[in-house]
Amino acid sequence: QKEVEQNSGPLSVPEGAIASLNCTYSDRGSQSFFWYRQYSGKSPELIMFIYSNGDKEDGRFTAQLNKASQYVSLLIRDSQPSDSATYLCAVTLSSARQLTFGSGTQLTVLP
Amino acid sequence: NAGVTQTPKFQVLKTGQSMTLQCAQDMNHNSMYWYRQDPGMGLRLIYYSASEGTTDKGEVPNGYNVSRLNKREFSLRLESAAPSQTSVYFCASSERGDEQFFGPGTRLTVL
């Protein structure tokens, strides 16, 4: 079992819809959770982080963390074509002061 | 602030050649990282340096060496390049080891 798993997609949503991206992790001791956005041919860019159970909102983005179920999700409201990218989930495992990345979910927002 | 910079942006090598990828950060971060990214594999950690003067292996260190030259600079060396090392290489830096900021990447092709 991979330590951090994401659906590879591709996930397609119409413009204006809510895009929901999910990530599960295997280490119950994980403390920090991050979402990166990566446009094709570019480097990953940090867009959200969450440390505590519950929701964290930043503009059109909401990160949700459920440590009991070991999943973290990212919701993008009012999706725009400019949101089309690969979204990487990253987790700080309890055994190391490093990030472990999922393989990413490719999102396409259709005009 | 330039953030994290990497050189070169592109490189083509022949099997057996050596090269060094350079990375520098101007955010006064303690930790620096080298990742490789291959299609469908996400980001995999090659080596990291938690602080100046220390380096540690990541998930895929074979065939690579690193040097933390000072707090700003962290280089990655391929002593004898192999086609399996064809990839995109990203350097990242972090203050505490979790929230990481990435450079623009180096696209390496080994023939």
Image: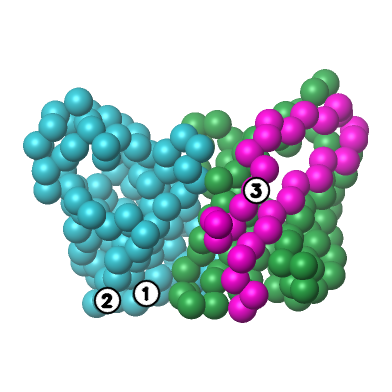
Q: Residues within 10 Å of mark 1 (few under 14, many from 20)?
A: many
- The relative height of residue A87 versus residue A99 in the rendered view (above or below) is above
For the residues beneath circles 1 and 3, the answer to whether they share a chain is: no
The answer to whether residue A10 is magenta is yes
Q: What subunit carries mark 1?
A: B
- Chain B: drawing colour: cyan
Q: Which residues are magenta?
A: A1-29
Amino acid carrying label 1: it is Ala
Which residue is rendered at x = 40% and y = 70% of the image?
B31
Which residue is rendered at x = 24% and y = 67% of the image?
B68
In the image, B1 versus B46, the foreground residue is: B46
Locate residue B17, reporting x and y percent: 10, 37
Q: What subunit carries mark 3?
A: A
Q: What subunit carries mark 2?
A: B
Q: Residues within 10 Å of mark 3 (few under 14, many from 20)?
A: many
Q: Which residue is mark 3?
A: A6
Q: Quadrant of residue A80?
A: top right
Which residue is rendered at x = 42% and y = 39% of the image?
B38
Q: Which residue is mark 2?
A: B54
Q: Which is more foreground, mark 3 or mark 2? A: 3
Q: Which of the image's four quarters has the C terminus of chain A?
A: top right
The answer to whether residue B85 is magenta is no
Q: Are marks 3 and 2 in contact (CB under 8 Å)?
A: no
For the residues beneath circles 3 and 2, the answer to whether they share a chain is: no
For the residues beneath circles 2 and 1, the answer to whether they share a chain is: yes
Which residue is rendered at x = 48% and y = 77% of the image?
A95
Label 3 – label 2 distance at C-alpha: 32 Å
Label 1 residue SS: loop
Label 2 residue SS: loop
Q: Which residue is mark 1?
A: B50
- The relative height of residue B19 versus residue A95 in the rendered view (above or below) is above
Mark number, residue A19: none
